[in-house]
Image (spheres, rainbow, N blue to C red):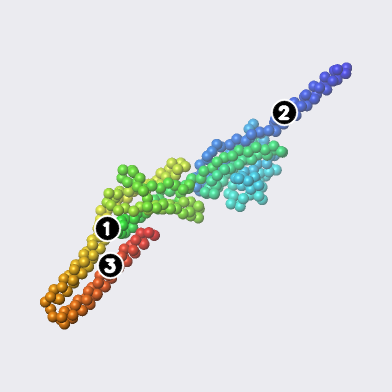
Amino acid sequence: MDEERLLIYRLGVVFICLLHMVTLRAEQFTVTGLEGPVLAPFGTVLELSCQLSPPQNAQHMEIRWFRTHYTQPIHQYENGKDLFGEIIPKYVERTELLKDAIREGKVTLRIFNVNPDDDGQYHCFFKDGKFYEEHITEVKVIAGSSQIQIIVHPPTTKGVIVECHSKGWFPRPHLEWKDSRGEIIPAESKSYSRDEDKLFNMKMTLLLQNISLRNITCCLWNPLIGQEESTSIVLPDEIFSWKSIWSLIVTVILIMMALFIITHSYKLQVMEVFVSDAQFDLDAMWLDDMTMILSMLMVFAVMLIFFLYFILRGRNMK
C-alpha cells in the first residue's frame, strides 16, 4: 500500500508540474506586425497593425504604442479602456486604436494628418501580468512636389544667373542641373529651408557664361522612393549678348581715355615748338583745365557703369 501511495503521489506531482508548465506556456506569446519600412504620405492617415501569436483575447491586457520611451506613449489601452493622461501632447486627438479584432489579439493604431514628426520607429507593446512582448515598425514619411519654378535674372558681365525653386519635399531631395544631353551641370550653389509643416523648400542656382548651355533642366528626386520631378527652359540667344555689350562699353571708354591723353601730350609738344612762351603757358593752362574736366567726366562715366553693374549683380544674388 505504501508503494502504491508513493506512486500515486509521484504521478500527482508530475501532473501538477505538467499542468503548471502548460499554464505558463499558454500565458506566453509573441507580437507580430508590419515589416517596415512603411511609407506614409504627408497629410494622410497612417494605420499600423500588430497581432498576438498565438491568437488570444487581449481585452484584459495592457496595450501601449510608443516611439522611443515606454513612459511616453502615443496611445494607451488598459483595463478595457483607452487612457489619455500620459499621451504625448502632439499626439493628443490624433490617434485612434481600432479594437474590432482584439479578442483574437489584433489591434490597429490609426494616426491622422501624418507630418514629418511622425517619421521613425513605433513600438506595439502587449503586457499580460508580468509577461510582455513588443513589435517595432519603421515608418517613413514622404512628400513630393511637381511645382518647380525656374527664374532667370538679368544678365551681368559675369553671365546669366538662373535659379530653381521647389517647395514641399520630405525627406530632403537631391537636386541637379542637366543639359540637353542629360549630363550634369555643376551648380553654383544649393540651399534649403523648412516651412511651418517642416517640409523642405529647395533652391539651386546656376551661372551660365556661354550660349552652349541654352537648354537646361532642373531635376529633383526623392531618394527614398525614387520619385523624380523636373522642368526645363530654353534661354534666347539675345540674353547672352549683354556680356559683349558690357565688354564693348568698357573697352571704348578705355580707348577714348588713352587717345585723349596721347592727343593732349602731342598738342603740348607742338605748341611748345611753334608758339611763344606766354601764349604757350595760357594754352597749356586751358588744356590742363579741359583735361581735368574731361577726366572727371570719364571717371564719372566709369563709376556710373560699375554702379549699374553692381546693382544688377546684387539683384541676381537675392
Mark in front: 2 vs 3? 3
Where is residue 299, by image quadrant?
bottom left
Asked if the residue under mark 3 is in contact with the one under mark 1, i.e. CB atoms within 8 Å, the reply is: no
Mark in front: 1 vs 3? 3
- At a point 24% along the width and 75% down the height, the residue shown is 292
Asked if the residue under mark 2 is in contact with the one under mark 1, i.e. CB atoms within 8 Å, the reply is: no
- At a point 33% along the width and 43% down the height, the residue shown is 182
Residue 190: x, y in percent? 41, 52
Q: In which quarter of the image is the N terminus?
A: top right
Does residue 207 appear anywhere in the picture? yes
Q: For the residues marked 2 and 3, what is the alpha-carbon distance in whole angstroms? A: 98 Å
User: Is 175 displayed left or right of 210 in the figure?
Assistant: right
Element type at mark 3: helix
Q: In which quarter of the image is the C terminus?
A: bottom left
- Residue 22 numbered mark, or none: 2
- Residue 302 numbered mark, or none: 3
Where is residue 239, by image quadrant?
bottom left
Q: Work out whether mark 2 precedes mark 3 in sequence or the reverse, and give the earlier one.
A: 2
Residue 58: x, y in percent? 67, 37
Amino acid type at image mark 2: Val
Residue 170: x, y in percent? 48, 48
- At a point 80% along the width and 21% down the height, the residue shown is 11
Element type at mark 2: helix
The residue that mark 1 highlights is 243
- Residue 17 numbered mark, or none: none
Crowd class of label 1 (few under 14; some 14 to 19; many from 20; radius 10 Å): some
- At a point 25% along the width and 72% down the height, the residue shown is 295
